[in-house]
């Protein structure tokens, strides 16, 4: 049987949620990933030394073998004086949500300029700025494109600040990241490598923010990833919502991709004749950017069919009911 063994990967953008359901989500991630950049948009959000430590401990209680890399949510009221304290307890990034851009972001930022002191403190502390790069006022397909000038301004004012355009979804976003200095990079999700807006229209389980766009946008993301460009690394943005919140008139945004990530990525890379680049994409390029060592553990993925279940822990997984030609 054909198989591939790679360094156990990192999921550099993951929503583990909270409460009872977190047990399933955390185990699902730890199964395939050694580390994860854990997003802070819980309710209430993760914003302080206390809430970071509490959240980190609750994850480690479930999956002690997993290394949660902690983030905090940047709020309009965030005190720049807190940044060095967060850095000291190991917080690796601050997450910037434009107000209303996505799930649990109503308390986000409406005017980036009021955040200058926080961004300066992050630059000084060498804390990564992780951005949900969408302008909520714009037409849904233009939201990412219209946010890019803000990233450009941030980079002009804070040239040393490391910035991630999370879950890049458009050709404009890809071209922008390529054109910027090396401290401006992007994470790429499995679903933005696969889906277009048509998949969202046909199935509300695929709804997410930013919305998957046109074929040419998807092709541009694929080209960046399959070429091995070191500015584009993996972050799943796996974001589970209970089935009832997806199969309804106003479906929540978020796709639960965790159960299929490595098998589907292996299939996609193989089909595009670049299976040899998978390890860098999921296990090396992100670690290089965050300046963390590569994991020592390995994982093997097998060329063996996997049928994606219709439901996992009360959530519809991405590609439910489909067969993937690789499995763990
Ligand atoms: O689709 C999304 N869901 N995009 C995000 O940015 C957040 C996420 C969630 O938390 O559900
Ligand atoms: Zn996310």
Image (cartoon, rainbow, N blue to C red):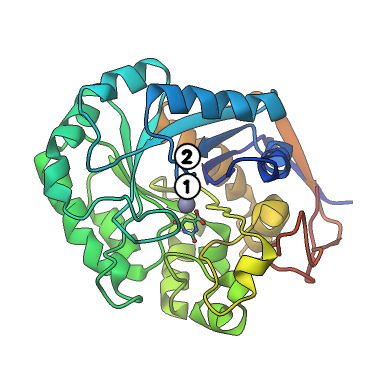
Element type at marker 2?
Answer: helix
Query: Is residue 47 placed above or below 189 in the rendered structure?
Result: above
Q: Which residue is mark 2?
A: 285
Mark closest to the chain's N terminus, 2 or 1:
1
Q: How far across and how far down the image is residue 13, in percent?
A: 50, 45
Q: Front-most of 128 and 273?
A: 128
Which residue is painted at 64% across and 74% down in the image? 247
Quarter occupied by residue 303: bottom right
Which residue is painted at 16% across and 46% down in the image? 154
**Residue 279 badge:** none
Element type at marker 1?
Answer: strand
**Is the C-beta of the residue carrying label 1 under 8 Å from the nearest atom of ligand 2?**
no
Query: Is residue 31 placed above or below 211 in the rendered structure?
Result: above
**Is the C-beta of the residue carrying label 2 under 8 Å from the nearest atom of ligand 2?**
no
- Is the C-beta separation of discs 2 and 1 under 8 Å? yes
Q: How far across and how far down the image is residue 326, in percent?
A: 79, 57
Q: Which residue is mark 1?
A: 233
Query: Is residue 58 placed above or below 229 in the rendered structure?
Result: above
Quarter occupied by residue 98: bottom left
Query: Is residue 27 placed above or below 267 in the rendered structure?
Result: above
In the figure, is residue 191 to the left or right of 174?
Answer: right
Q: Can residue 50 be seen from the camera position used here?
A: yes
Q: How far across and how far down the image is residue 97, in percent?
A: 33, 51
Q: How far across and how far down the image is residue 44, in percent?
A: 45, 41
Label 1 CA crowd tier, 10 Å (few <14, some 14–19, many 20+): many
Which residue is painted at 52% across and 56% down in the image? 189
Q: Can residue 63 be seen from the camera position used here?
A: no
In the figure, is residue 281 to the left or right of 76?
Answer: right
Q: Front-most of 103 and 280?
A: 103
């Amino acid at each position: 049987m054909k198989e591939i063994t790679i360094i156990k990967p990192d999921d550099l953008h993951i929503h583990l949620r909270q409460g009872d359901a977190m047990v399933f989500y955390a185990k699902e991630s730890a199964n395939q990933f050694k580390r994860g950049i854990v997003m802070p948009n819980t309710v209430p959000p993760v914003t302080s030394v206390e809430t970071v430590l509490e959240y980190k401990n609750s994850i480690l209680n479930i999956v002690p073998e997993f290394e949660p890399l902690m983030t905090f949510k940047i709020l309009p009221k965030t005190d720049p004086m807190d940044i060095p304290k967060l850095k000291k307890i190991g917080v690796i990034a601050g997450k910037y949500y434009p107000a209303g851009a996505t799930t649990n972001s109503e308390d986000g930022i409406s005017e980036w300029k009021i955040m200058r002191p926080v961004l300066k403190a992050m630059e000084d502390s060498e804390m990564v700025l992780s951005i949900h790069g969408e302008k909520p006022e714009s037409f849904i397909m233009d939201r990412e494109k219209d946010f890019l000038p803000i990233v450009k301004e941030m980079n002009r004012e804070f040239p040393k600040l490391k910035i991630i355009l999370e879950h890049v979804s458009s050709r404009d976003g890809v071209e922008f990241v390529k054109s910027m200095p090396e401290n401006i990079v992007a994470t790429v999700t499995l679903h933005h490598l696969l889906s277009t807006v048509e998949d969202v229209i046909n199935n509300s389980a695929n709804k997410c923010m930013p919305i998957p766009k046109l074929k040419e946008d998807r092709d541009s993301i694929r080209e960046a990833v399959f070429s091995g460009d070191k500015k584009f690394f993996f972050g799943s943005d796996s974001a589970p919502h209970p089935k009832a919140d997806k199969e309804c008139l106003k479906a929540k945004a978020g796709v639960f991709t965790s159960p299929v990530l490595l098998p589907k990525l292996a299939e996609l890379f193989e089909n595009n004749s670049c299976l040899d680049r998978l390890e860098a994409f999921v296990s090396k390029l992100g670690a290089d950017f965050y300046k963390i060592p590569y994991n020592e553990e390995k994982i093997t993925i097998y060329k063996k069919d996997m049928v994606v279940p219709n439901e996992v822990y009360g959530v519809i997984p991405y590609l439910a009911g489909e067969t993937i030609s690789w499995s763990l």
